[in-house]
Amino acid sequence: MLLDIIFSLDSVITAVGLSDHLFIMMAAVVIAVGVMMFAARPIGEFVDRHPSVKMLALSFLILVGFTLILESFDVHVPKGLSYFAMFFSIAGREPESVAQ
């Protein structure tokens, strides 16, 4: 259970990077911890069957990380741009997964 909480810290980074509202950040963290506690095994099995999901999740974290770094230097990155990049990544992966 402790590992689930530790591994859900990436959701904290994502929530901070994608939201300006404290309530939304807190809700995202609580939901992520709950999902990890109850669905860690099925999610792990899904990721093992579909290794490209690991790369997709890593790219999301890198995107959010760079956004946070840029904002620390007072370079504003519109949230819509990040959302579009994430949507485009998922939509671009969907035809690949249907073909398999």
Image (tube, rainbow, N blue to C red):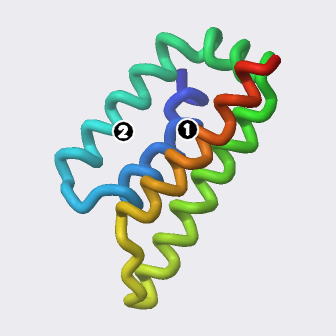
The amino acid pointed to by label 2 is: Val
Sooner in the amino-acid sequence: mark 2 or mark 1: 1
Task: Name the spot of residue 87 as percent of width and height, x first.
Answer: 50, 45
Q: On the rendered structure, is 4 left or right of 32?
A: right
Instruction: Depth check: give the residue in front, 27 or 95.
Output: 95
Mark seen at residue 83: none
Per the image, the residue denoted by label 1 is 6
Label 2 residue SS: helix
Q: CA distance from mark 2 to mark 1?
A: 11 Å
Report x, y in % for residue 53.
70, 33
Residue 37 relative to residue 30: left or right:
right
Q: How many marks?
A: 2
Question: Closer to the camera, 13 or 75?
Answer: 75
Would you say 62 lies left or right of 1 here?
right
- Find disc 2 in the rendering and name its residue: 29
14 horizontally vs 44: left or right: left
Residue 7 in the image: above or below residue 72 = above
Q: Position of residue 37 (x, y in %)?
A: 48, 17
Q: Who is closer to the viewer here, 65 or 33?
A: 65
What is the three-letter code of the residue carrying label 1? Ile
